[in-house]
Image: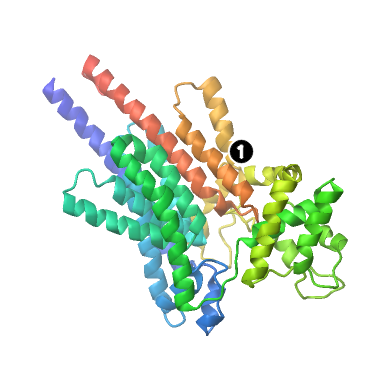
Amino acid sequence: MKNTYATKEKKFLTFDKFFGISFYLQFFSVVLVIIPNVNPYEGAQMYISDINSTTDWWDVAAPTVPRLLGLEENMLKWHFFQIFILISAAYGFRKLLPVDKIVKVTHQVFYMIISYLVLTFSVLGSRDGIALSLTLLGIALIIRTKQNSYLIRYIKLVFATIALLLASQFKIASVVIISFLVFITIVKPWLKRSQFLLLGLFSFVVLPWSTFQLDNYLTETIQIQKAYPEQQVLLYDLAGVACWSTSERAVDFANKALSEFLESNISDKELCHFLVPYGWDSLKNFKVDDDNSKQLVPTSDKSKFLNFQKNWTDLLIKFPKDWLEFKTNIMGQVFFMSNFYDRSGNLINIDNNEQPVAYNAFLVPARILDKLFLLTYFFAFSFIIVSKIFYKSITINGSAIFILATGVAVNILSYVADNGRYCLPYIVLFWILVLRNNCHQDNEEVKKNFNESGDLR
């Protein structure tokens, strides 16, 4: 029996090594094929010569990181930064979902698909990809401190905090929300109650407070202009109520709040003509009578923004039904957002002059997933329903569903465009958790089968 076990164990390890090697092949493929052809995220900020003329419209990191890396002179530094981000994503993913815990071929293949998405999204996902990568790194450092000495444990916690705070400067809200989700769904089962309460305090209080304090400090220290990017959501919500509500009082209230942002030659009806359910860009860039100037102009004035924020809050209090009706109208966009990899529509056409053939060929699988709507909330929820009815052996617990529900709520409440990169972090986390749960279940089943028959099945 002992020799039989050794033989089977050897085969099992060889099987694991094959899929472990495939992960590293994906990693080096991204380094060699994708990274050399990816420009800096929101790169327009790096070309403004005076940093005092830049804004925090894309958070603090957009104008500062390119300058710290000297991108105006040497793109090589940018590519090294991308490799660091890729390593962060790879380390975080491998610690959250170790390959040696996966025993079934179908799960191994599923693991390869998720790792492919994580690695490509980390370098292609602009600020969202960078934020997710650093967040995975920070969380992985935290959950892997249990086996270490106290000194190493605290060193890891310090670096984890730095990683999460750095991530927050690329995408403030998503880092706080994703950290919260991972802590309560993945980290909680591994911790004692006192440890979880401390991490809960960190993720719900310390991290959000530190994030916003750091953002304000860096903005004032570097003297970047405040742009108040959150007003995109407020403007879009008020425009939606003004144009699509059936309540005259709600329409009048919204139009009055928007009047300060509209140029004098624009009427309310002309604004509504350009309101569409797939984003607010059409509102800020529309033209009337071939006039190329922007007609809906966001403000950088603090007092004006705070007053507008108050008007938006009053709208929610006085006309919640009209606001919810508008949010319901864009719910379909959120459920079917699937255009991160396939925004150009080039699916199988790998001979694209804009990028090398190898680059386009490597992204064909991701573009197929996009085109088939397999990276959407709709598919994820459909998978849950079908599994519960027809495949009850598949374990999908409340934590996985909670991640999806939170993602949908966040994307609906903060909706400004139908960009797939806004929902992809939540969808990836959902599939990671589904795979973790089912791998744990299958590991227990494998042990049971071996104990009963002496054969690994």
Q: Residue at x 35, y 37 (%)?
A: 188
Query: Quadrant location of the N terminus?
Result: top left
Q: Is residue 146 left or right of residue 427?
A: left
Q: Is residue 132 left or right of residue 454?
A: right
Give how far across and how far down residue 54 sits, in percent. Answer: 55, 77
Give the residue at mark 1: 378
Q: Residue furthest top?
A: 452
Q: Residue at x 76, y 57 (%)?
A: 239
Q: Residue at x 48, y 21 (%)?
A: 392
Query: Quadrant location of the C terminus?
Result: top left
Q: Nearer the viewer, residue 154 or 270?
A: 154
Displayed quadrant of residue 390: top right
Q: Residue at x 61, y 60 (%)?
A: 230
Q: Is residue 402 above or below residue 205?
A: above
Give how far across and how far down residue 123 sits, in percent. Answer: 45, 60
Can residue 365 be seen in the rendering of this structure? no
Q: Nearer the viewer, residue 320 or 131?
A: 320
The amino acid type, in three-letter code, at marker 1 is Phe
Q: Nearer the viewer, residue 162 or 97?
A: 162
Q: Residue furthest bottom?
A: 49
Label 1 sits on a secondary structure element that is helix
Q: Residue furthest left?
A: 2
Number of labels in the image equals: 1
Q: Residues within 10 Å of mark 1 (few under 14, many from 20)?
A: some
Give how far across and how far down residue 3 sits, in percent. Answer: 12, 25
Q: Is residue 166 left or right of residue 310?
A: left
Q: Is residue 445 above or below residue 130?
A: above
Can residue 68 be seen in the rendering of this structure? yes
Q: Is residue 63 left or right of residue 263?
A: left
Give how far across and how far down residue 312 sits, in percent. Answer: 69, 55
